[in-house]
Image (cartoon, rainbow, N blue to C red):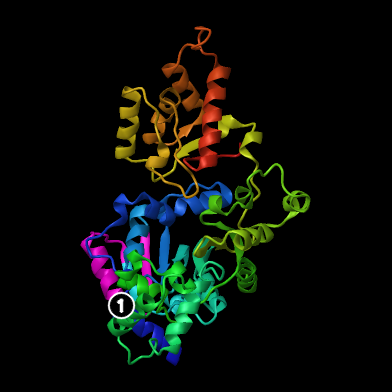
Amino acid sequence: MTEVFENVRQQFDNAPYPRHPLEASPKDTPQTLYKHNCATAFYYRNRQVIDPQNLTILDAGCGSGYKALALALANPGAKIVGVDFSTRSIELAKKRLQYHEIKNADFHTLSLEEVANLGIEFDYINCDEVLYLLPDPVIGLQALKSALKPNGIIRSNLHSQFQRFRYFRAQKLFEMMGLMEENVTDGMAIDLVRDTMNALKDFVDLKTYTWGEKLQNNEEGILANFLLRQDRGYTIPQLFDILDRVGLEFISMVSWRQWDVMDLFENPDDLPAFLGLSLPETSIIERLHLYELIHPNHRLLDFWCGNPGTSQAKIPIENWTHWDKVRVHLHPLLQNSSTKAALEACLRQHRGFSPSEYLPIPGLSNVFVDSVTATGLLPLFDKPQTMPDLVTFWKKTRPLNPITLEPTTPTEAFDAVRDLLVTLEDLGFVMLEGTG
């Protein structure tokens, strides 16, 4: 074991991450559940709707188990396996999932590079906030790839070089001050960071952009930002180079809606000549790199990837012609009794329904569906529906055309249901399975 590896391991033995209390749970935090729900990734890749009960999920670098708990709650019935090189973290992870009565979970004290020793192939691998701490993320991803099923998906991330550059400077400063040495306790180092940052004048760049009131009293935040050993930053081209060297295929950024470079321009239809001509022809790498150069607001380069050749070409939904073969699913995190009760309350009170309140998808503002249209979603809370079934239900709930007062025709009902589904699928609230 190298000195660097042991240094990092000791930091997480002394201060397991994250520091959420044992009783804390993400069950009422839809943003966390959405990020850890596997259905979104598989659907985004191939419009494949999966059953989580058939999945085996690895949480690589599981820390104190909070994210393993999120994976279990977001994917009910899945088998969860957690590994971490910190013995203390694994002890806490076991206690956490036992406390929350998650039975289908195992934990192992194991480095990320040794996951193949488990002898298990995984449908989904979550490697969150780990790769950027490795001397070579290529080796880490190669290890994960060796334990991935042919059609499996990896979610991982790297720290952004551009967004984090001031924190990297701070880490270098405190390393020069000796606060990263083994003989310096975390408590002593945290106190010295506070003293140093508070002693700086307010106009000083490092203090202005990294030091805030919330962070001053947040020991975990100080450790994770100012005293994080072996922290490194990467760019989009470096990320794609790493994937290429490992032999993995990029699927998408996890929060893809927040990486659209066109959203950064005041008037996307009236760009400077060079950008207007070149942007439509740029590759996905170039577009993502442009985004981080112009607006590096993402701390993490958070991505999904998989084995080459597993992504399939998708026909744009607006071009589908065989709607009679389509099967419609609500997003799994919407399909629950509390969301159904909220929809029914909206319908009784003749007010709009906001699916984004119950499934806050990153990059979307509040989404409202009027009460008449939202009625068409009710059957989906019981089970997935075929398109013909939804059209029949629509005709029952809206038998007359409100303008002509003539009976609603099959074409009118079909068009209304199709338009609703196309919109909600694009927003991420429903999943459409079939050839279209």
Q: Nearer the viewer, residue 235 or 125?
A: 235
Q: Is residue 401 above or below residue 314?
A: above
Q: Label 1, on which residue?
A: 15
The residue positioned 49% from the left and 64% from the top of the image is 299
Q: Is residue 263 left or right of residue 158?
A: right
Q: Nearer the viewer, residue 412 or 307?
A: 412
The residue positioned 39% from the left and 52% from the top of the image is 31
Q: Quadrant of the N terminus?
A: bottom left
The residue positioned 70% from the left and 57% from the top of the image is 283
Q: Would you identify the image quadrant in which residue 384 lies?
A: top left
The residue positioned 60% from the left and 48% from the top of the image is 263
Looking at the rendered structure, the secondary structure element under dot 1 is loop
Which amino acid type is shown beneath numbered disc 1? Ala
Residue span colored magenta: 79-105
Q: Is residue 367 above or below residue 258?
A: above
Magenta span includes 83? yes
* Residue 168 visible to the viewer: yes
Q: Position of residue 152 (x, y in %)?
A: 52, 61
